[in-house]
Amino acid sequence: MSLNKNKIFGYTALVILILGTALIALGLIKYPEYAIGFCIAGVGFYAIAWAFNALKGRI
């Protein structure tokens, strides 16, 4: 399996998306009193994943 830069950016974006979704779910299900903080952090992870996906093919 050959990993070039584009595949690495793609896999990284996928992992960060999963972590962002986990943060949002954790905030909504387990800690509802801190849900706003968890959701803001999760949306931040989504933004970073979007940026990594946008960089794919340009670097």
Image (cartoon, rainbow, N blue to C red):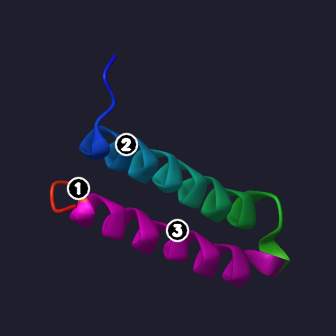
The residue labelled by disc 1 is 56
Element carrying mark 1: loop
CA–CA distance in space, label 3 to label 1? 17 Å
**Label 2 Cα neighbours within 10 Å, binned few <14 / some 14-19 / many ≥20:** few
The residue at 41%/62% (across/down) is 49
Distance from the alpha carbon under mark 3 to that under mark 2: 17 Å
Crowdedness of circle 1 by 10 Å Cα count: few (<14), some, many (20+)?
Answer: some
- Residue shown at the point (83%, 79%) measured from the top left: 33
Residue 2 x %, y %: 31, 22
Q: Are marks 3 and 1 in contact (CB under 8 Å)?
A: no
Q: In what element is the residue under mark 2?
A: helix
Between 7 and 37, the one lying in front of the other is 7
Camera-side mark, 3 or 1: 1
Indicate which label's residue lies in the foreground, 3 or 2. 2
Indicate whether 7 appears above or below 58: above
Measuring from the top left, give residue 17's x and y in whole percent: 47, 54
Does the stretch in magenta take in 1? no
Image: 10 above or below 20: above
- Where residue 45 is drawn, which disc sits there? 3
Check disc 2 and give the amino acid type.
Ile
In the image, what residue occupies the spot 16% across and 62% down? 58
Helix, strand or loop at mark 3:
helix
Q: Amino acid at mark 3?
A: Phe
Q: Classify 10 Å Cα crowding around label 3: few (below 14), some (14-19), many (20 and above).
A: many
Query: Which residue is tagged 2?
Result: 8
Is residue 49 located in the magenta-colored stretch of the structure?
Answer: yes
Q: Nearer the viewer, residue 5 or 25?
A: 5
Residue range (magenta): 34-55
- The answer to whether mark 3 and mark 2 are in CB contact below 8 A is no
Q: CA distance from mark 2 to mark 1?
A: 9 Å
Left or right of 42 on screen, residue 33: right
- Quadrant of the rendering where the C terminus is positioned: bottom left
